[in-house]
């Protein structure tokens, strides 16, 4: 039994009829998802993540619950104004840096440089979008999974990813970024998501490869983020990383079974590895000498290792796994470097990476069109929920008066 | 041999229940990444997971008592639509959110009552599955109930949509309460549930939610059944084409 097979005993997702599903449902589903694994995070984790909410957040939350207006332009205005004011004194900056240097967590209420806030919003929302868009290539095989057990495990995995997305959107909201704005930025192309999800999942083995390589790379990226300087993000990553490691294991197990199967299955597995290997390496971002934002992020302890360091760690841990199950890494230049104590790899095709980011991957347009279509088709449902809540509030206040 | 016939009857009964759960679980899983918002995606995936879980337990039990060396996957992936025994309501396309909620509105209260009764079954495995599933179905019903209120008493559009959806699925609810010969045989043995006896309670649960949601109950002007005899709609064939694709393309392998 994997944890997923025993997973369906919690259901706190049922939204309370008198509350907006935008807020209530989210909190409940996050708690529910948290309880689904054997490795339960402390029950206070979600609470702690939302502790010390900024005034902006609580206003926004009230707004979500109280009015049909979902995106408050004054929040953006507020941010623009602070961006415009260039009077963050050196003393404040120094005090902030000192806190970061002494490994104290920055919390939503704390003063922080605007660039720090913006960097975090960009990174966390991009991470959230990746979780959400990633549901598409994996969801592509739920209805075709080759056994009932695989179907259940895949469903649970995709449900976890949706939960990660929610959790991360909530973390970004503690920085004053409304979820509806993040959603709009994703759909307009202003916000990015991990490029790996612009590659199609065309065979069952791709579900194995995604779990093994993509979740595997995500773990390497994310484990250091459990110690990132922004408190809500760091706490969120603790839970997410635990679930990602289950995902990685189940992906590797799919590949193991296929690689030990008949000729068609072996080919399926090797083909998936061939297609996903290089894009997985690209998940760590451009090489260090071409990574403009990295230095500042390191100083702020948002990042703790460079792109190349993380990529090397992933390569070193994954190659023995491939060898163990008898698959071949699609890189003729791959070799162990005794001196460095690491594997050397061939050249990464960065033009492909930038080309996909630019919108020219096989699935860029499909992924966004899918997201928009689901959002638009659900508009009447969201309107109904808001209208119902408004009626209930009107009734309640009528009774009070 | 009486006892082996008896086992075959239990296997048939469990296959019917497993097919119900499998087809509905499949339909609900089609919602993944299509929900009206993320919270609802999670809820629907979770409910789907419950149904797939039930399908596995029922089909595994069927395979065990049948004793012919089949397993849950052989039952799920290597039977054609004429051999599937699910009732028709479960195989209908997922439709839009109103259609999904309308179907759940019929199915959830039915399952709350059904599993309460099945918990008393003399077959300990069926009773055990019911004991787990009853908790799930109570939550499913809460979820559906809250959506019935929102859609029925939300906007004019949502009211109209849920009303239409309910009307389109209404004729399929009768089959849930139909007793087959197999049901009667196993009811006498203390194993199966008396479906007809569940109907009055179901009626009052439905009437309660419809009234609260400001909806009128559709009239009983048409009815469909036949799933337990393998007489299906056109939809099931397509569902199975997708569900069974890999196993049929590469039979006899481990996955
Ligand atoms: Fe994730
Ligand atoms: Fe994952």
Image (cartoon, coloured by chain):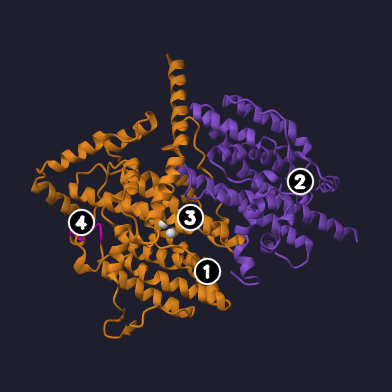
Chain colours: A orange, B purple
Quarter residue A4 falls in: bottom right
Note whether A110 is above or below A387 in the view shown. Answer: below
Q: Which residues are magenta?
A: A296-303
Q: Which residue is mark 3?
A: A158
Subunit ID for the residue under disc 3 = A
Q: Which residue is mark 1?
A: A254
Note whether B75 is above or below B199 in the view shown. Answer: below
Tag on residue B226?
2
Note whether A24 is above or below A324 in the view shown. Answer: above
Residue A261, how many percent across, how many down? 57, 76
Give the residue furthest to the right: B1
Query: In this rendering, which labeled residue sits more in front, label 2 or label 4?
Result: 2
Asked if disc 2 is less than 8 Å from ligand 2, the answer is no
Label 3 and label 1: CA atoms lie apart by 16 Å
Q: Nearer the viewer, residue B198 or A357?
A: A357
Q: Nearer the viewer, residue A36 or A328?
A: A328
Q: Is residue A10 visible?
A: no
Q: Which residue is mark 4?
A: A300
Q: Is residue A71 left or right of residue A321?
A: left
Give the residue furthest to the top: A401
Label 4 and label 1: CA atoms lie apart by 39 Å
Query: In this rendering, which labeled residue sits more in front, label 4 or label 3?
Result: 3
Q: Earlier in the sequence, mark 4 or mark 1?
A: 1
Instruction: Assess whether residue A135 is covered by the magenta stretch.
Output: no
* Residues packed near mark 1 inside 10 Å, few (<14), some (14 to 19) or many (20 plus): many
* Residues packed near mark 2 inside 10 Å, few (<14), some (14 to 19) or many (20 plus): some
Q: Is residue A300 left or right of residue B139?
A: left
Residue A395, how many percent across, how many down? 47, 20
């Amino acid at each position: 039994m994997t944890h997923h097979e025993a997973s369906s005993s919690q259901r706190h997702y049922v939204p309370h009829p008198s509350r907006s599903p935008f807020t209530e449902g989210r909190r409940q589903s996050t708690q529910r998802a948290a309880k689904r694994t054997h490795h339960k995070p402390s029950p206070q984790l979600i609470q702690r993540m939302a502790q010390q909410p900024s005034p902006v957040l609580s206003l926004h939350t009230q707004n979500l619950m109280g009015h049909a207006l979902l995106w408050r332009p004054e929040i953006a205005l507020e941010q623009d104004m602070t961006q415009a004011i260039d009077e963050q004194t050196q003393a404040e900056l120094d005090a902030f840096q000192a806190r970061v240097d002494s490994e104290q967590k920055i919390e939503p209420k704390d003063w922080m440089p605007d660039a720090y806030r913006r960097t975090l919003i960009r990174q966390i929302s991009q991470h959230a979008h990746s979780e959400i868009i990633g549901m598409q290539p994996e969801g592509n095989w739920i209805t075709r999974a080759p056994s009932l057990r695989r179907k259940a495990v895949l469903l649970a995995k995709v449900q976890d990813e949706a939960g990660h997305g929610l959790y991360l959107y909530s973390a970004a909201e503690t920085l004053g970024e409304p979820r509806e704005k993040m959603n709009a930025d994703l759909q307009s192309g202003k916000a990015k998501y991990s490029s790996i999800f612009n590659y199609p999942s065309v065979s069952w083995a791709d579900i194995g490869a995604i779990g093994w390589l993509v979740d595997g790379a995500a773990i390497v990226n994310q484990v250091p983020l459990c110690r990132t300087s922004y408190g809500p993000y760091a706490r969120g990553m603790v839970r997410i990383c635990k679930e990602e490691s289950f995902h990685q294991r189940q992906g590797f197990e799919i590949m193991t079974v296929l690689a030990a199967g008949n000729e068609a299955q072996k080919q399926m597995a090797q083909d998936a590895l061939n297609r996903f290997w290089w894009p997985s390496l690209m998940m760590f971002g451009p090489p260090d000498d071409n990574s403009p934002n990295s230095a500042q992020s390191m100083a702020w302890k948002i990042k703790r290792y460079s792109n190349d360091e993380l990529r090397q760690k992933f390569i070193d841990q994954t190659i023995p796994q491939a060898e163990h199950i008898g698959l071949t890494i699609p890189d003729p230049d791959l070799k162990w470097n005794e001196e460095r104590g690491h594997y050397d790899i061939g050249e990464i095709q960065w033009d492909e990476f930038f080309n996909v980011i630019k919108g020219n991957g096989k699935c860029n347009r499909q992924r966004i069109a899918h997201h928009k279509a689901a959002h638009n088709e659900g508009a009447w449902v969201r309107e109904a929920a808001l209208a119902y809540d408004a009626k209930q509030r009107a009734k309640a206040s009528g009774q009070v008066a | 041999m009486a006892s082996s016939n008896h086992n075959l009857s239990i296997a048939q009964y469990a296959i019917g229940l497993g097919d119900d759960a499998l087809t509905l679980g499949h339909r609900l899983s089609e919602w993944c990444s299509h929900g009206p918002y993320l919270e609802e995606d999670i809820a629907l995936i979770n409910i789907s997971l419950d149904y797939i879980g039930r399908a596995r337990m029922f089909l595994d039990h069927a395979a065990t008592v049948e004793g012919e060396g089949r397993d849950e996957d052989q039952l799920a992936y290597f039977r054609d639509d004429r051999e599937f025994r699910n009732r028709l309501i479960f195989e209908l396309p997922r439709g839009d959110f109103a259609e999904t909620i309308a179907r759940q509105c019929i199915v959830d209260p039915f399952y709350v009552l059904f599993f309460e009764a099945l918990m008393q079954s003399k077959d300990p495995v069926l009773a055990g599955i019911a004991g787990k599933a009853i908790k799930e179905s109570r939550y499913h019903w809460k979820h559906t109930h809250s959506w019935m209120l929102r859609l029925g008493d939300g906007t004019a559009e949502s009211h109209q949509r849920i009303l239409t959806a309910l009307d389109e699925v209404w004729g399929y609810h009768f089959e849930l309460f139909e007793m087959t010969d197999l049901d009667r045989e196993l009811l006498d043995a203390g194993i199966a549930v008396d479906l007809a006896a569940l109907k009055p309670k179901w009626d009052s649960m439905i009437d309660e939610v419809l009234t609260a949601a400001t909806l009128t109950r559709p009239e009983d002007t048409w009815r469909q059944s036949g799933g337990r005899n393998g007489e299906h709609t056109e939809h099931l064939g397509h569902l199975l084409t997708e569900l069974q694709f890999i196993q049929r393309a590469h039979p006899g392998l481990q996955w």
